[in-house]
Image (cartoon, helix red, strand yellow):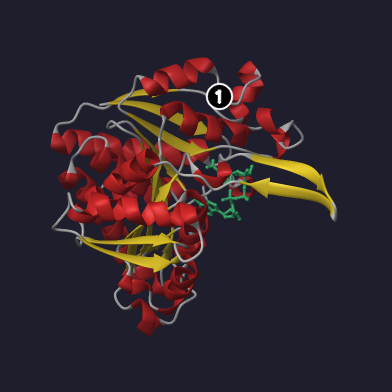
Amino acid sequence: MKIAVIPGDGIGPEIIRQAYKLLDRVGAKYNIDFEYQEVLMGGVAIDKTGLPLPEETLDICKKSDAVLLGAVGGEKWESLPGHLRPEAGLLAIRKGLGVFANLRPAILFKQLKSASSLKEDVLGDGLDIMVVRELTGGIYFGDRGRRQGKNGQEAWDTEAYSEMEIERVARVAFDIARKRSKRLMSIDKANVLESSRLWREVVIRVAQDYPDVSLSHMYVDNAAMQLVRNPRQFDVIVTSNIFGDILSDEASMLTGSLGMLPSASLGQGSLGLYEPIHGSAPDIAGQDKANPIATIMSVAMMVRYSLGSQEAARAIELAVEAALDEGYRTQDIMEPGMTLVGTEEMGDKIASRI
Ligand code: NAD
């Protein structure tokens, strides 16, 4: 498996080092030959080439089986114009790789229940919700503009979706639901928006190809409320770009810690982009304080979705659980009575449990 690796900036290189440890163990145990090629993106790429996403990086990523990204960004590059900032590389690589489905699992491990802002009885044994967000269409990419109106300036943005765009992300979500609890919730605003009415029609049509998955629908305002009232009713959620942006952040905060949450962005083939949801955390970079679990869980997603090995993915997730069960915590998830470890030691503890 050819993996393009983007360590990036801030804590990026430290957390990616832990990913290598995991992949080495997984490779040895499951007889998988991982081949890595490190490439430049973000601030480090700006310093060396003047561009946040050099062409060579995108080329190498496109020719790989998967792309693993640490994080990009930092104060040093904040005064640059928008299109030359590290974060511009993020949008460009998603677009360049054609990844239209963003998978954001919100997992609350039972060992970390006290980190959640919700009450224990609402959380039960922990949470495991998968938000599938459409990533390359809708209002973030639609027609926009300003004009002079009779009450001063007017501005507009357009939410537009084609059947093709809805269908392909719906299929990704149905496929995932099929591998989990066989329940899919589509979230829209079909009582008001025409684009949502088309969204619902297409999702219902695609459902005919998945008779084994039970599909339900919810309006986005209700979904935002239900996520904090009774999050365990959700398993797989599929929704548009803007609703997914908001709901996936809401769902991830139910779990309490940014350092634990992975993501995957998938396109048509098996190539995917895998990254933790947090940023480059410049405040703790280089101090052996970063939690590597979000990155390690991203590796599990990579092995599951781009390599197709459910077994190896599960082994990584169980290794994370085992390290947590044994009481190891980085400072962001530290609780009284637990053992405080740094980035490297957490990586070692998890890798040794594969
Ligand atoms: P951030 O996610 O980097 O950090 C927010 C807070 O969470 C900080 O206190 C940080 O120390 C902590 N944190 C984050 N990840 C952690 C981890 N793994 N372990 C322990 N603590 C962790 O967000 P920010 O501070 O708003 O942004 C910092 C930089 O990262 C900015 O330049 C921003 O643009 C960039 N950013 C990049 C990405 C990405 O690469 N995908 C995403 C978000 C932000």
Q: Which element is circle 1 on?
A: loop
Q: Is residue 235 above or below residue 279?
A: below
Query: In the image, residue 221 lies at what x, y percent?
Result: 50, 69
Give the residue pinned by disc 1.
53
Mark 1 C-beta closer than 8 Å to ligand 1: no
Quarter of the rendering occupied by the N terminus: top left
Horizontally, residue 216 falls left or right of residue 50, namely left
Label 1 crowd (10 A; few <14 / some 14-19 / many >=20):
many
Residue at image location 43% in from the left, 79% down from the top: 229
Mark 1 residue type = Leu
Which is nearer the eye, 241 or 122?
Answer: 241
Query: In the image, residue 217 lies at what x, y percent?
Result: 34, 65
Residue at image location 48% in from the left, 61% down from the top: 247
The answer to whether any part of residue 104 appears in the image is no
> What number of labels is visible?
1
Query: In the image, residue 113 lies at what x, y percent?
Result: 39, 73
The answer to whether any part of residue 315 appears in the image is yes
Which is nearer the eye, 37 or 351?
Answer: 37
Q: Is residue 204 above or below residue 47?
A: below
Residue at image location 41% in from the left, 36% down from the top: 17
Query: In the image, residue 226 lies at what x, y percent?
Result: 42, 75
Horizontally, residue 148 falls left or right of residue 169, namely right
